[in-house]
Amino acid sequence: MDKYIFYSSPYKIKKNRGRWKKLLWIIPLTCVGVIFFFFKQDYFNISFHKTSSSICNNYQTSQTYLQSHIIKSRPKHNSVEIKEFKVKSGATLTSILSPYLPISEIYYLVKKSKKIYSLSNLIKDHTYRLYFKGRKIQKFEYEIDDLHKITINLSLPDYPISVHKIKYDIQNSFIVATIHSSLFDAVERAGERDSLAVRLADIFAWDIDFIRDIREGDSFKVIVEKRFRKGRFEGYGRILAAEFINQGRPFTAFLYTTTGGRTEYFSKDGVPLRKSFLKAPLKFTRISSRFSYHRFHPILKKILPHLGVDYAAPRGTPIKSVADGIILKASWGKAAGNYIKIRHPNGYITIYNHMCRFARGIKKGVRVKQGQIIGYVGATGYATGPHLDFRVKHNGRFINPLKIKSVPLRPLSPRELARFKAQTAPLLAILESPNRVVAERELKKIPLHEGGSSFQKRM
């Protein structure tokens, strides 16, 4: 047993000697390093502090330079910075305000705003502004339409919400044009926007069918308010007066508010332009098929009565009710597709076929106003392409929609008529001026008016 205790192989002895040799080299090197460290400590500290000082000085210099440029781009501490944006597709009040307010407070704002105007669905391309004082948000402002804006004061307790009119600089303008190809083309040639053509068509919609009545050589004169903000043209205000000559026949329109507060357009003789029926349920489309008792059906391939008028139009074109009434049906039919049936006074019923969809809130029993959008052009049911099949019944019998005789509504009383003629005489003088120079001179005498209508709550 003893021989095993003291036994050690030659290999192990050799290996241990190698480890000792390595240790003998490490010890002197460590000593040299310690001596070098203490010897060079003062020099190293001096160099380090010089380098650190240089870096800090350069950093402070660069920070001073940056801060001086940032301060120039910022408003002063006590001033308010305004940032203006357009609402992007899919944007919400939460996505806009979440960088500045807690989510719980934004939800509170959405709920609170419903009492005045619902901010739960912001409209794409509408303008909104954020007001800042320093880095803190002070106010949110959103333009509801071209006349009104909603403001949330975020600097006051409980975040007061209010609606205000948008302020414009108003300028009366006199526009004259002749039609060569279309109403839109004539308006563009006069240097104006398409929206003016739409407004004109709306005013004369009871007397002129802009789908089939317009001819080359027709002309119009318009006295319209133009709205400006900070010197930039922002669109049209009220059309004060207009004259449209269609196929040699003149039609006039004057905006007038009665003593009872009713504001609408009247002819120069004081006859209301608004009548019991619109000329057409669509704007600026074409008639693809007329009323007939013998028409070849493109799908059924046989001769059948077509007791309506087909208006070809792009899918999604808005369809309007031609008169006030109550919806009898808003349903689906195999041939008609999505259709709406409306009952009107004096035994009239109108039918609108092949819609792609109904407008919001349209259902059986709902009252609709003349000119209200009830649905959109489609190709549902028996249809070869997008169009509106428009039909009219009178006392249970189908009649040709293009031959409806529409009568004016609520004519002015003799006393009201005298007041109307006195107020519209300056506008009539401009429309009947022999030349533009005289018209422009008379236009300057017309008082400017801010215009606009009272805000209607939208949920």
Image (tube, rainbow, N blue to C red):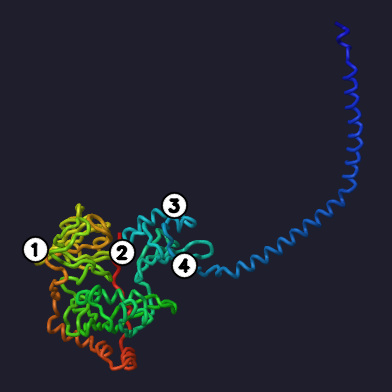
**Circle nearer the viewer, 3 or 4:** 4
- Which residue is disc 4 drawn over? 84
Depicted 105 relative to depicted 273: above or below: above
Rate crowding at label 4 as few (under 14), some (14 to 19) or many (20 or more) other CA atoms within 10 Å.
few
Amino acid on which the number 4 mark rests in the picture: Glu
Q: CA distance from mark 3 to mark 1?
A: 60 Å
- What element does badge 4 sit on? strand
Residue 103: mark: 3
Q: Nearer the viewer, residue 312 or 431?
A: 312
Does 392 sit left or right of 168 as displayed? left
Q: Quadrant of residue 3?
A: top right
Does 63 sit left or right of 188 as displayed? right
**Contact (Cβ within 8 Å) of mark 3 with mark 2:** no
- Which residue is disc 1 drawn over? 397
| Residue 455 position in % (x across, y down) | 30, 68
**Circle nearer the viewer, 3 or 1:** 1
- What element does badge 2 sit on? loop
Query: Which circle's residue, 3 or 4, is located before the other in the chain?
Result: 4
- Which residue is disc 2 drawn over? 314
Query: Which circle's residue, 3 or 1, is located before the other in the chain?
Result: 3
Query: Which circle's residue, 2 or 1, is located before the other in the chain?
Result: 2
Amino acid on which the number 1 mark rests in the picture: Arg
**Circle nearer the viewer, 4 or 1:** 1
**Circle nearer the viewer, 3 or 2:** 2
- What element does badge 3 sit on? helix
Query: Which circle's residue, 4 or 1, is located before the other in the chain?
Result: 4
| Residue 280 position in % (x across, y down) | 21, 70
